[in-house]
Image (spheres, grey):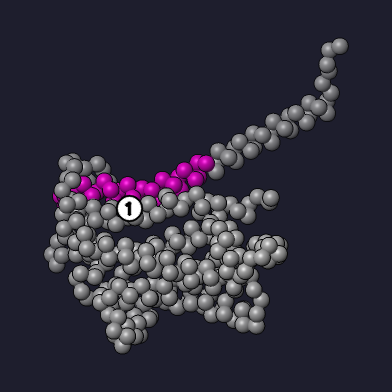
Amino acid sequence: MPQTVTKNQATISVQDRRLQAKKVSKKTIIYVLLSIYGIVNAYPILWMVLNSFKDNMDFAKNPFGLPVQWLFENYKTAWETARLDTYFLNSVIVSVTAVIITVFAGALASYFLARFTFKWSKSMYGFFVFGMLIPIHATLVPMFLLMKNLGLLNTHLGLIFPYIAFNLPITIFILVSFMKAFPSDIEESAIMDGCGVFRIFWSIILPMTKPAIATVVILNFINNWNEFSFALVLINDEALKTLPLGLANFAGQFTTNYGAQMAGLTIAIIPTIVIYMLLEEHLVKGMTAGAVKG
């Protein structure tokens, strides 16, 4: 028997094709917009890398094109001018140490603020969040006097402590918001299995918080790595200065070596890109964690 298509079936088929076409169109538009957004954000980095191979004349005449002559010695000049061998290591020591302490202390504080109910929990959380509103530059003079009285000027600790203090608010804000979404059945099951408070934190809560931890690690590292004001005020010893202070050496009284400066900036941005690539998977999971219901 030949199959016949009714009018209703034909109408439904046409509607399905139209819906499918709309979905494809929406996806195409979204991909195009995201691609444009990605290019806009990636172009400054590409521009910086290309200009790191130019001399000042080439940079002035053709700032947006390929180098006429690829000057790889700009990187050698940048390494020597900015003293990257010393300043780079100082930045690594200060930034990594501050990130580890900030994330660990912030995770502990967030665990108790998010998973326990006690009298001053909301006030303590508000106290930490209020720290996000304090401008860093307004604390430079008090911080200098405090570090001077503590004898921490021209030391790594003199930078590590302020970095921890000013990054804790955003760390706690993000982690508390993430930990509050966990069901209470997790702790109840763990307690029935004989787990203590810190065992629950270390073996259950902390692994589940990896996406949020990846986010705060990236934010803290970028803030610490690029920080200039505290390093300028609290560090005068050449052997202890950080990378942002070294990059400032490119600006001379009468002229600036733009090619070498771009080379120094290119070297300085590499650790940030590496950290992001290592934590990208967890970061994406954290961004999409609430998009799908299990």
> At which x and y percent is residue 73?
15, 48
Left or right: where 11 falls relative to 19? right
Quadrant hosting residue 227: bottom left
Answer whether residue 290 is magenta in the image.
Answer: no
Between residues 267 and 184, which one lies in front from this camera angle?
Answer: 184
- Up/down of 270 relative to 152, above or below: above
Q: Which residue is rendered at x = 53% and y = 60% of the image?
A: 212
Quadrant hosting residue 121: bottom right
Left or right: where 83 falls relative to 183? left
> At which x and y percent is residue 246?
22, 64
Q: Amino acid at mark 1?
A: Ile
**Residue 158 visible to the viewer:** yes
Task: Return the residue found at the far left.
Answer: 254
Q: Which residue is rendered at x = 37% and y = 56% of the image?
A: 272
Answer whether residue 32 is magenta in the image.
Answer: yes
Please give the residue where the numbered disc 1 appears in the rendered image: 270
**Residue 141 visible to the viewer:** no
> At which x and y percent is residue 156?
30, 73
- Up/down of 260 relative to 105, above or below: above
Between residues 114 and 51, which one lies in front from this camera angle?
Answer: 114
Task: Return the residue found at the far right.
Answer: 1
- Up/down of 132 relative to 212, above or below: below
Between residues 172 and 33, which one lies in front from this camera angle?
Answer: 172
Q: Which portion, as a residue range, is magenta?
A: 31-57
Q: Which residue is rendered at x = 23% and y = 49% of the image?
A: 52
Task: Return the residue found at the far front.
Answer: 194
Helix, strand, or loop for circle 1?
A: helix
> At which x and y percent is residue 107?
52, 68
Task: Return the residue found at the far top.
Answer: 1
Left or right: where 223 falls relative to 7? left
